Image: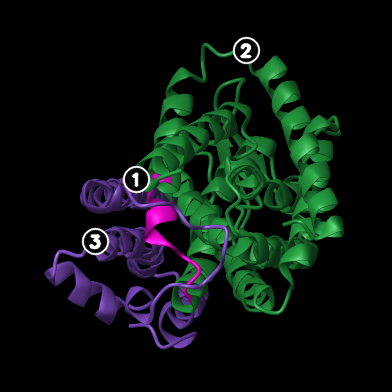
Chain colours: A purple, B green
Amino acid sequence: MTRNWDDHRIEEIVGNLLRAGVMLSAVVVLAGGLIYLAQQGLSSAHYAVFRGEPSDLRGLRGIVRGVFTLDARSIIQLGLVLLIATPVARVAFSIWGFAEEHDRMYMIFTGVVLVILLYSLLGSGSAF
Amino acid sequence: MNILEFTLLVAMGSFVAGLLGALTGLGGGVVLVPLLTIFFKVDIRYAIGASLVSVIATSSGAAAAYVKEGFSNIRIGMFLEIATTLGALSGAFLAAFVSTKDLAIIFGLVLLYSAYLSRKPRPREQRNLPPDPLATKLKMNGSFPSEEGGLRQYNVQSVPTGFGLMFGAGALSGLLGIGSGAVKVLAMDQAMKIPFKVSTTTSNFMIGVTAAASAGVYLNRGYVDPGLAMPVMLGVLAGSLFGARILMQAETKILRLVFSLVIVTLGVQMIYKGLTGTI
């Protein structure tokens, strides 16, 4: 039953990784949110009309640039990017886990999932 | 309404959605989009973007708790994630071509169907099925700690059907910004004959990865608004963590009934709004 034990150990590390990623992103989102409310809390809300976000908030480069100028909306967006990156990191870590178990077949399956995720993040728009 | 009031109200609504979703096991994502579009008059595309992000948060937060119990099967999850992520990409691309009215109608139908699924009694679990050659080749068969004590073995069935259903679950997730946990459990529990406990925990594990696949597309397309996603994500996350903590004491049978009725009401309203074009 060594296989199960290994699976379990990997899952436990994965579980902690997920929790850490979510908590980190929640802290960043909350920090950005507080600045956002302090600066713009009294202006009126406008979500009934769809405009789409400015290009600076659509990709990592623009978001990071905004974070350096302490732009509140960019800080929130960075937290959200961290959140989206958490499951991606989990998948990347699983490749290593399957490699430890010498499971070629599942390394390939996991690699396919990772490529699809990276395509979604990097290839589907101007982003990153 | 100013941004401060709006943010606090959305955060409270999202907290309740996350709480009910965790207590009933139906997921909070499914009521978020109707809540935002019907009560807060948010454009459905912004609502879907915000909901998708919060789905990742709850799934990843809950998965950390589930893996410790040893129920989820990472091989089944990883193999089926090929289908759900491909589906999620397709759904997210499709979302750009579907009108907001049609989105609302599809959303309403999915709400009604998930309410139906949650009320339908589950057929008796079939045990001791013979091993299926494809599932064996894919090393999917496993075991989990059973109620009677000790490990119970299970043999996974009909992998191609499960894979197909998972593609559908991913497409719905990408199109509507929901976790599609109900369809995922349906695919594993009913089609692949995976024990219910293993199905639900593995499904929860998969939801985050599926949602991340379409969230990237939504972010690139400018559908994720930080001002809206902030209270939604924080509210749902806090609600679902609180829900998971009080789950043991809660009377979930009545809650499930109430929540199903809420889902039906929202589903009918979404369809009505879609048909009359008032979304």
The stretch of residues the image draws in magenta is B222-231
The verdict on residue B83 being magenta is no
Amino acid type of the residue tagged 1 in the rendering: Glu
Determine which residue is flagged by label 2.
B251
Q: Circle 1 is placed at which residue position? A: A12
Chain for disc number 1: A
Marks 1 and 2: which is nearer the front?
Answer: 2
Dot 2, how many residues are within 10 Å of its Cα: few (below 14), some (14-19), or many (20+)? few
Where residue A70 appears, x then y in whole percent?
15, 64
Give coordinates of residue B141: x percent, y percent: 63, 52
B225 inside magenta stretch = yes
Quarter holding the C terminus of chain A is bottom left
Q: Residue A75 got which mark?
A: 3
Picture layout, residue B264 above or below residue A100: above
Mark 3 secondary-structure assignment: helix
> Mainly helix, strand or loop, the magenta region?
helix
- Find residue A74 and report its image quarter: bottom left
| Labels 3 and 1: the sequence-earlier one | 1
Residue visible at 51% across and 78% down in the picture: A116
**Lateral position of residue A10 relative to residue B41, left or right:** left
* Subunit of label 3: A
